[in-house]
Amino acid sequence: MKVKHEEYLKKCGTYRAAAELAFFRSFYSSQERYDALMSSIYFDLETSREILKPLSLDEARLYTEWVHSHRNRILEIVRVLNVQSDERVIDIGCNIGTFVYHCSLKGTSPVGIDINVNSLKIGQRLLRNKGKNSYFLCGDATLLPFQRESFHKAVAADFYEHVSEREKETITKEVYRILKDKGVFVIHTDNLYRHKLSLYVRRIAALARFQNPWKFSIPFHETHIGVTGARKIVNILRQTGFKISKIVYLRGRFSIDKFLIHVPLVKNILASSYIILGEK
């Protein structure tokens, strides 16, 4: 589905990313509809019949792919985090509280912290609609307002790609400080190598069509200022004192990805994103 709005294409870098942004913004006019979309994608992890009804075929396909993509990612992060009911958990850069919600399903009462108060308000509303109490805190992850060894586990999902390397180092040190001995820190973030490879392919394809290749850029490049490979994150974790227990590479949206993601020599390049588990 191509988007006619050039400002979306300029902002996002690809037609698909622009289409996703346009689709997402079409729900802004109704809080009820917006809440249903967010709950469907991040909490329910399944498509909603009510949302699908008014959509065109292209929009329905995009929405369905979106839900499936987030479901696979979220469930894998939850699996790696492996929260127990007696553990205290913090979701750092929690946005609307995706993992506050999913960890609460395990019987614990997680804490969510984010610098964006509007996202926290949406999260409180969504969790309230789900019958869940939430503890959200508006704050800066580089200076976490908690005492030493306050938490058993911490998760930072889709957050590290939005902060600089120096901020990554500071945040990691803060997480190390607030985790208990043997505490676990799970990071999920985008893979720089996949972004670069996709960008090169799009530019070569544009040249073959006698189009300007430079109109394409890494999607959401203005906000994803800290996208990097797994090795960089591993080094930051190790320098802070964490031991690396696990790295999981997640497949992209193409059918061939489900095969290539298991090939040792290329999975770190072709993975859409990755999960790293560090233990204190």
Image (spheres, rainbow, N blue to C red):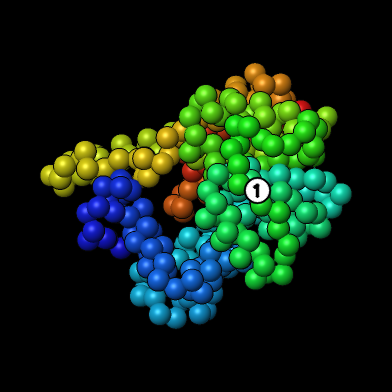
Residue nearest the observer in this picture, 61 or 279: 279
Residue nearest the observer in this picture, 114 or 1: 114
x%, y% of residue 119? 54, 55
For the point 16% across and 42% down, the residue is 212
**Image quadrant occupied by the C terminus:** top right
Q: Which amino acid does label 1 sit on?
A: Leu
x%, y% of residue 91? 66, 46
| Residue 277 shows in this picture | no
The outermost residue toward the left is: 210
Residue 11 horizontal side relative to residue 253, left or right: left
Measured along the vertical axis of the image, is residue 266 above or below residue 62?
A: above
* Corner quadrant of residue 158: top right
x%, y% of residue 224? 43, 39
For the point 20% across and 40% down, the residue is 213
Residue nearest the observer in this picture, 226 or 65: 226
x%, y% of residue 134? 71, 58
The residue carrying mark 1 is: 137
* Corner quadrant of residue 20: bottom left
| Residue 160 shows in this picture | yes
Q: Element at badge 1? A: strand
For the point 47% across and 62% down, the residue is 65
For the point 60% across and 32% down, the residue is 142
